[in-house]
Amino acid sequence: MKSLYAYFGLLDLHEVDSPGHSFYQLGLLDQIKYNFMDDDAQFDFFSYYPEVLQTGQFPKYPNTALGEVFNRYAASLLNQYCIPFTNMIDAIENREYDTLFLKARFRNLSTLTKKWKDTHIFETIIEKALNAGYTKDKIVVLDTDMSLSQDFSERYSKYCTIQLANVACSERFILDCASVHMSSIDDRKTTSVFYGNVDTSNYKAGNEKSKILTEILVRTTDFSDLSIIVKEGSVPIKSEDIEYIARNNRSHIWETLENSRIMINVSKDKYDSEKFIPARVYEALIFGMIPVSYKFEWLCETFSFSNELDYIEILKYLIEIDSEDFKKAYKFYINKFIENVYGT
């Protein structure tokens, strides 16, 4: 069995300046495989990026124990990587795919400015699939960040299965990554990381991040080194105590995540109300970090906070404990996560 996975991004440590959390995508593919496909099934991977930005070379990851886990999953899950648009359309028209899994795309100011045609390509794939006879259950539109509009759902729900990807990483991928860190976590720095936009005032209504974010980031620098991963050139908080990492410098991002203890998770308020797990929580666990989350008691109460004082108490604990106790804390979080997300 072979299916198509279309994603706005690439899987390797590329340097394209665009948003997107690529490091948990293999875990997402493995979860899709678990939900929909046979054990030996694979994906053709298609990127909505302009083809001029794609190398087409099979993804390779750093020469670390974690990188080897990624390489193993990539080899198991991927059939063709960065399949050209025309080849992909031909395969759809020839009904070579069992199911099409399409990361939803929608027009926004950034891609309109760049003149990228990702949303047009997304809509074209659906049209070609319908013309080829694919039924609604064989065209799965994935919403990975609760960003789909009501208008989109109303227009496409009759043709496609719209799937909210709340469980966006397989349990076995999480556990395979965690097993690496349980034996190599000793040299980890007490650095904290925030990954994403800090100023979200221009987001669509209802998608802004909690207003407590800036306050939490500033307070973090009183106790811990802080790295913020943002769009290149963005400096939302002016401070000599903050290291800014451009979101397209993915090699540096990988190294930072693999060597830090704390991932700060202050996200959209609706993630808490809808019990939705954002990408940075998965990425934290994948890289051996503990996500400290604003109002995520339902996921792990111990490392969730609702006010600044609770946050500082968690932060101090995680930077003051020795490596062995940090390993225990990470294992505690993993166990809670597995229990609350996968029910095992």
Image (cartoon, rainbow, N blue to C red):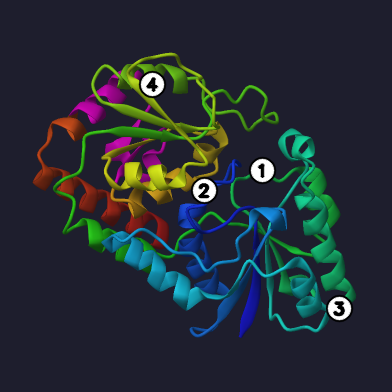
Q: Callout 1, which amino acid?
A: Ser
* Dot placed on the residue nearer the N-terminal end, 1 or 3: 3
- In the rendered structure, does residue 307 fall within the stretch colored magenta? yes
SS type, badge 4 = helix
Q: Earlier along the polypeptide chain: callout 2 or callout 1?
A: 2
Quadrant of the drawing holding the C terminus = bottom left
Q: Which tag, 4 or 1, sits closer to the chain's start?
A: 1
Q: In the rendered image, which residue does mark 1 sit on? A: 147
Q: Nearer the viewer, residue 262 or 272?
A: 262
Q: Which residues are magenta?
A: 289-316
Measured as percent of width and height from the top left, residue 330 is found at 23, 49
* Vertical relation: 13 (above or below) 3: above
Amino acid carrying label 3: it is Ala
Vertical placement of residue 99 versus 28, above or below: below
Q: Residues within 10 Å of mark 2 (few under 14, many from 20)?
A: some
Q: Which residue is mark 2?
A: 21
Q: Earlier in the sequence, mark 2 or mark 3?
A: 2
The answer to which quarter of the image holds residue 218 is top left
Viewer-nearest of discs 2 and 1: 2
Q: Earlier in the sequence, mark 4 or mark 2?
A: 2
Q: Where residue 132 is drawn, which disc sits there?
A: 3
Residue holding disc 4: 216
**Amino acid type of disc 4?**
Ile
Quadrant containing the N terminus in the rendered view: bottom right
